[in-house]
Image (cartoon, rainbow, N blue to C red):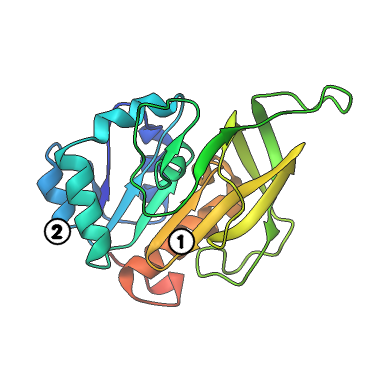
C-alpha cells in the first residue's frame, strides 16, 4: 500500500487520479503511524516551501525512519524540495535532509523572456541511468510550475535548464524526487509513476506492479 502524505499543500486530486489510472493501491493516512507500515511513500506539494512545516514532528520522524528501513520515497515538486536540507524560500523551515543541499530561487532571463515562475513544458536532460526514468529518453518533456529548485548534485538523475540549470529528478538509494508534476505530464509522467510503483513492488517490470 502506498501512503500518499497530505500536509495541506499537495495536489492530491491529480496524484490520486494518476495512481488510480495505474491501478495502484494507496491511502491518504490521517495519522503518521500508517507511514511506518506503508510499502512506499509519496510526498506531493505545490506552493511555498513553508507549508512543509506541517510535516514537522511525528510525520517527519516516521517518514525518516521508514526511509532508513529502505521504504521507497517519492517527492513531487515541493515534496522533492523537502528531501533536501532546506530552502531559501522559507529559511526557518527544515527539509527532511536525506539529500544534501539547499533549495534556491531560479533567476530567469529577461532578455530571453524566461520568466519566473517557470511554468510549462520543458525537457529532461538525463545525467545517469536510473530506475525512476526507465523507459524514457533524454529530452522527454514534462510539466513544471515552480520558482525554486534544487542544485545539481551527485543525486541528480536529470537536469533541466530555464536560465538556470537545476535538478529536475533525483535518485539516491530508495529516495526519489521530481521537480515537475508527473501527474500532469501525460505519458512520460505516467511512466515515471509506473516506475516508482514497480520499485515499490520490488519488480523491474512496471506491468507486474500490484502494490
Q: Residue at x 57, y 35 (%)?
A: 104
Residue at coordinates 69% horizontally, 39% vertically from top-left?
121
At a point 44% along the width and 70% down the height, the residue shown is 206
Lower sequence index among marks 2 and 1: 2
Q: Quadrant of residue 92?
A: top left
Task: Bin the neighbour count of mark 2 within 10 Å (Cα to Cα): few under 14, some 14-19, many 20 and up.
Answer: some
Taking the image as shown, residue 121 lies to the left or right of residue 27, namely right
Q: Give residue 124's position: percent from left, percent from top.
A: 68, 53
- Label 2, secondary structure: give it: loop
Which image quadrant is residue 173 in? bottom left
Quarter residue 180 falls in:
top right
Q: Label 1's element?
A: helix
Which of these two is toward me, 91 or 155? 91
How many marks overall? 2
In the rendered image, the quadrant that contains the N terminus is bottom left
Give the CA distance from mark 2 to mark 1.
21 Å
Q: Where 202 sits versus 38, above or below?
A: below
- Label 2 sits on residue: 37
For mark 1, what is the residue? 194
Q: Percent from the top left, x then y, of residue 85? A: 41, 44
The residue furthest right is 111
Frontmost residue, 7 versus 88: 88
Mark closer to the observer (2, 1): 2
Residue nearest the observer in this picture, 142 or 84? 84
User: In the picture shown, does residue 76 fall above or below 107?
Assistant: below
Q: Residues within 10 Å of mark 1 (few under 14, many from 20)?
A: many
Residue 142 x, y percent position in the rendering: 64, 46
Determine the residue positioned at 27% across, 41% down. Answer: 5
Left or right of 141 in this view: 175: left
For the C terminus, the quadrant is: bottom left
Q: Position of residue 158 (x, y in %)?
A: 63, 57
Amino acid at each position: 500500500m502506498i501512503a500518499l502524505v497530505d500536509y495541506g499543500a499537495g495536489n492530491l486530486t491529480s496524484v490520486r487520479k494518476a495512481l488510480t489510472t495505474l491501478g495502484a493501491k494507496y491511502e491518504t493516512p490521517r495519522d503518521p503511524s500508517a507511514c511506518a507500515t506503508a510499502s512506499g511513500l509519496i510526498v506531493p506539494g505545490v506552493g511555498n516551501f513553508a507549508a512543509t512545516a506541517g510535516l514537522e514532528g511525528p510525520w517527519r520522524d516516521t517518514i525518516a525512519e521508514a526511509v532508513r528501513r529502505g521504504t521507497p520515497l517519492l517527492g513531487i515538486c515541493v515534496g522533492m524540495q523537502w528531501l533536501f536540507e532546506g530552502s531559501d524560500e522559507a529559511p526557518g523551515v527544515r527539509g527532511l535532509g536525506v539529500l544534501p543541499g539547499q533549495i534556491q530561487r531560479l533567476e530567469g532571463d529577461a532578455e530571453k523572456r524566461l520568466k519566473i515562475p517557470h511554468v510549462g513544458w520543458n525537457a529532461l536532460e538525463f545525467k545517469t541511468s536510473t530506475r525512476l526514468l526507465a523507459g524514457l529518453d533524454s529530452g522527454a518533456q514534462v510539466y513544471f510550475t515552480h520558482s525554486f529548485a534544487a542544485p545539481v548534485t551527485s543525486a541528480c538523475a536529470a537536469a533541466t535548464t530555464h536560465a538556470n540549470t537545476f535538478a529536475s529528478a533525483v535518485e539516491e538509494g530508495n529516495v526519489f524526487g521530481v521537480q515537475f508534476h508527473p501527474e500532469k505530464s501525460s505519458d512520460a509522467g505516467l511512466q515515471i509513476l509506473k516506475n516508482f510503483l514497480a520499485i515499490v513492488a520490488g519488480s523491474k517490470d512496471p506491468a507486474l506492479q500490484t502494490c
